[in-house]
Image (cartoon, rainbow, N blue to C red):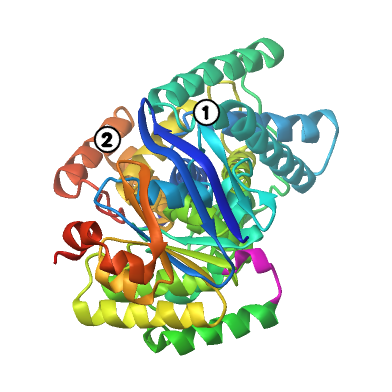
Amino acid sequence: MLLEVRHLDCYYGQSQALKEINIEVEEGECICILGANGAGKSTLLKTIAGLMKPRRGEIWFTGKRMDELPAYTIVREGITLCPEDKKIFPQMSVYKNLCLGAWIHGRKEERIKANLEHVYELFPILKERSDQDAGTLSGGEQQMLVIGRSLMSNPRLLMLDEPSLGLAPMVVNSIFETIKEINARKTTVLLVEQNASMALKIATRGYVIESGRITMAGTAEELLKNEKVKKAYLGI
Amino acid sequence: MGILLQTLINGIMLGSVYAMVALGLTLIYGILNVPNFVHGTLYMIGAYIAYFAIVSFGAPYWVGLIVSLIILFAIGILLERIVFRPFYDKPLINSFIVAVGLILVLENTALSLWGPEFRQFAAPSDKVIKVMGVMITAQRIIVIVTAAVLIWLVHLFIKKTRLGSAIEATSQNPDGALLMGINISHMRGITFGIGTALAAVAAVLVGPILLIYPAMGHTVIGMAFVIIIIGGMGSFIGAVLGGYIIGILETLVTSYITNFFTEAIIFGLLVLLLAVRPTGLFGKPH
C-alpha cells in the first residue's frame, strides 16, 4: 500500500470538514475523488500534504506515518500537491518557479536539469516562457507550471486539486492527457475533480465524498455506471 | 552651486542610511507581514555595540562594524524565533503590541546601562577631499560606497542564490514555499537577521557623523516607514529608491526652506502620494 488514510477527522475551528475518512491508494493507480463544492475534497488533499493538521486519524505513506510531520518535510517523503489556488510565485520567472520545485534535490544539478528537460518536454510552452514572470501566464499555462513544478521533485504520489478549474475545454483536454501520461510513467495520481466525466476517463478507481464523508467507492467503470453518480456528477 | 553640490552629497549620504534601514524593514515586512517597529531600536543597539567595540576595546572601525553586523544578525534571528514566531497565526495587533513592548524594554535598558548622554566614535579616516570647491569628509564617501555595495550584495544574494530564491518564494507565497519543501521558519529567521544587520551597519556607518544615544532610532524608524510606504510595502527597489529620494529631499528642505518642520513636509508628501497611488510607487495592488 502506497497511501493509507485511516479514520481521518478534520475541523475548521468548530465545524467538521472531514468525518471518518478512509482511503487506500496502491502504487501506480490513478484515483479520483468526486464531490460537490465544499464536500471536503480540497481539505483532504491539504491534510495529506501537511498544510492542515487532522484532529483525529492517521495518514500512512510507504509504511511511514505522515500526519505528525511538519508540512515542509512531506514533499521529501514523495508526496506533492498541485493546489487549487495554484500557489505559484508570481513575481518570479517560470524557470525559477520550476527550480524551486526541485528544492528538495538541493544542489544535485544533473538531476534538476534532467527534470527540467522532462517538464519542458511535457509542456513546451513553459520553455518558451521560461524567463517570463509566472504571474503573467494565462490560466492554462499557470496550471501547466503548477504540474511541472510539482514533477520537479520526482514525486511518488502526485495530488492534483481541480486541475480543470477555470480552463477552456481544449486546455482541459490537454492537461488531462498529460496527467494520464504522467500516471503511465509510474507516478501514482490522486485527483480531485468536479469535472467528473473527465476524471473518470483517466482514473482507475474513485471515491465519492459528500459533506465530509466517503459515501461511495469503486472502479471508474462502476462509478460511471452508477445511477447516483450519473445524476449528481455527470449530469446525465 | 557649491552649496547645492554639498547639500546633494549630504542628501545622498543620509539617503544611503535611510535606504539600508528601509531595505531591512521592507525585507522583514515582505516575509513576515509584520511592520517591525523594533527596527529603529535595533539600529540604536547596533550603534552602541560598535561604540563599545571601538571605544572600550580599542578595535579598529571596520572590526567594530563587522562585530556589530554579526551580533545584530544573531539578535535578529533570536527575536524572530522567541518574540515574533508565536504570533504569526494570531491577529496582527498581538505582534504590534509585542514590538512596542520590546522598544520600551530595550530602550530603557540602554538608558539605564549607558545613560542618556550623546556619544560618538571616530571615523576611520579624518581626511577631507576637495572636489569642485566642495569639501567632502572621507567618512561621507565611506557611508555612500559601503551602503551601495551592501545593497548590491543583498540584491545579488536574493536574486542569484538558492537560499535567496527560497526567501523570495516564502515572501511571495508561504504555503507554496512549504509545498516545495522549504522550511519557511528558517527563511523568516534568516531574513529577520539580514534586515536587522542592515540597520546595524547603517547605524555604524553614520556613527562618526551623527550622535549615538538611546532614542537615536526614533526619527530613523519613522522615516523608514514613510519610505517603505512610499516605495510600496515589501518592495526592494521601492525601499532603496525611496530611501535615496527621501534622504535628498530632507536635506534639500532643511538647507533651503526650513529645518523646523522637515518631517511635516515629508509626511505631507506621503499623504499626497498615497492619495494618488495607494500602493506606493512600486507596490503591488492587492
Three-letter code, disc 1: Val
Residue B250 appears in view? no
What crowding class fits label 1: few (fewer than 14 Cα within 10 Å), some (14-19), or many (20 or more)? many
Q: Is residue B54 above or below residue A72?
A: above
Asked if residue B220 lies left or right of residue A161, the reply is right
Name the mark nearer the viewer: 1 or 2: 1
Mark number displayed over residue B267 = 2
Kindly identify which chain the residue marked by label 2 belongs to.
B
Where residue A49 appears, as percent x and y from the top left, is 52, 52
Instruction: In this rendered view, identify the residue nearer to me: A174 or A60.
Output: A60
What crowding class fits label 2: few (fewer than 14 Cα within 10 Å), some (14-19), or many (20 or more)? some
The image quadrant where one finds the N terminus of chain A is bottom right
Mark number displayed over residue A151 = none
* Residue at the image position 31 percent from the left and 34 percent from the top: B262
Where residue B137 appears, as percent x and y from the top left, is 60, 50
Give me the C-alpha separation between circle 1 and circle 2. 21 Å
Judge whether residue B91 is colored magenta.
no
| Element at label 1 | loop
State which quadrant residue A236 falls in.
bottom left
User: CB under 8 Å between callouts 1 and 2?
Assistant: no
Residue B132 appears in view? yes
Q: Which residue is mark 1?
A: B38
Q: Is residue B59 above or below residue A123?
A: above
Magenta stretch in the rendered image = A102-108
Three-letter code, disc 2: Phe
* Residue at the image position 40 percent from the left and 49 percent from the top: B234
| Element at label 2 | helix
Lower position in the chain sequence, tag 1 or tag 2: 1
* Residue at the image position 50 percent from the left and 27 percent from the top: B87
Asked if residue A34 lies left or right of residue A31, the reply is left
